[in-house]
Image: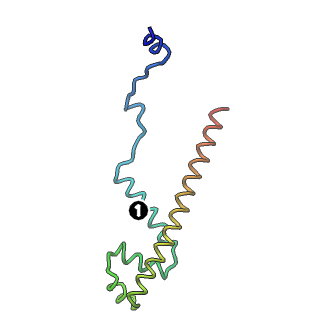
Amino acid sequence: MQSLRAETSHLTIEFRPEIHDIPSFTDEVARALDAKTVLEALSQIEPAFRTPVELFYVGEMSYLEIAESLKIPVGTVMSRISSGKDQLKTILVATTEGKRAKAISFGKRWTSRAMK
């Protein structure tokens, strides 16, 4: 008797992936979006730090190669990469928070319009 009540008081809904699943990005698309965001953020850090960071991460050069290329000591290269990474992290966090805030405000606007 109790199981009959439970069955009648709770609706059963069939999950259909083709209807209910949220569309997902492929890994390739996600990587491309992430790369674009990072490259945009990289362009915003101070030039003195940007060049060593780009040479190390994008150009895949060693500290020694960067030092020779820029004619600066290896210790300076290491320091500039560290400072550049700190700036990059700050910019990326701000960018991510900004995008999240826009998405939330867009969601609120959509909800308020839908309710009218």
Residue reaching furthest front? Answer: 2
The answer to which image quadrant residue 75 occupies is bottom left
From the top left corner, tell me how far across and down residue 8 is, in percent. 47, 12
Q: Position of residue 13 (x, y in %)?
A: 43, 22
**Label 1: few (<14), some or many (≥20) within 10 Å?**
few
Task: Tell me: residue 2, above or below residue 16.
Answer: above
Q: Quadrant of the N terminus?
A: top left
The spot of residue 43 in percent (x, y) is: 49, 72
Residue 59: give x, y in percent of width and height. Answer: 34, 75
Question: Label 1: which residue?
Answer: 35
Identity of the residue drawn at 48% across and 18% down: 10
Left or right of 87, for residue 27? left
Q: Work out whether 63 lies above or below 89.
A: below
Image height of 43 relative to 9, above or below? below
Q: How is the image coloured?
A: rainbow
Q: Residue furthest top?
A: 1
The residue that appears at 62% across and 34% down in the rendered structure is: 114
The residue sitting at 59% across, 52% down in the picture is 101
Q: Which amino acid type is marked by label 1?
A: Ala
SS for dot 1: helix
Report the number of discs: 1
Q: Nearer the viewer, residue 29 or 12?
A: 12
**Residue at 42% over, 59% down:** 34
Give the quadrant of the C terminus: top right
- Picture layout, residue 76 above or below residue 113: below
Closer to the camera in the image, 43 or 96: 96
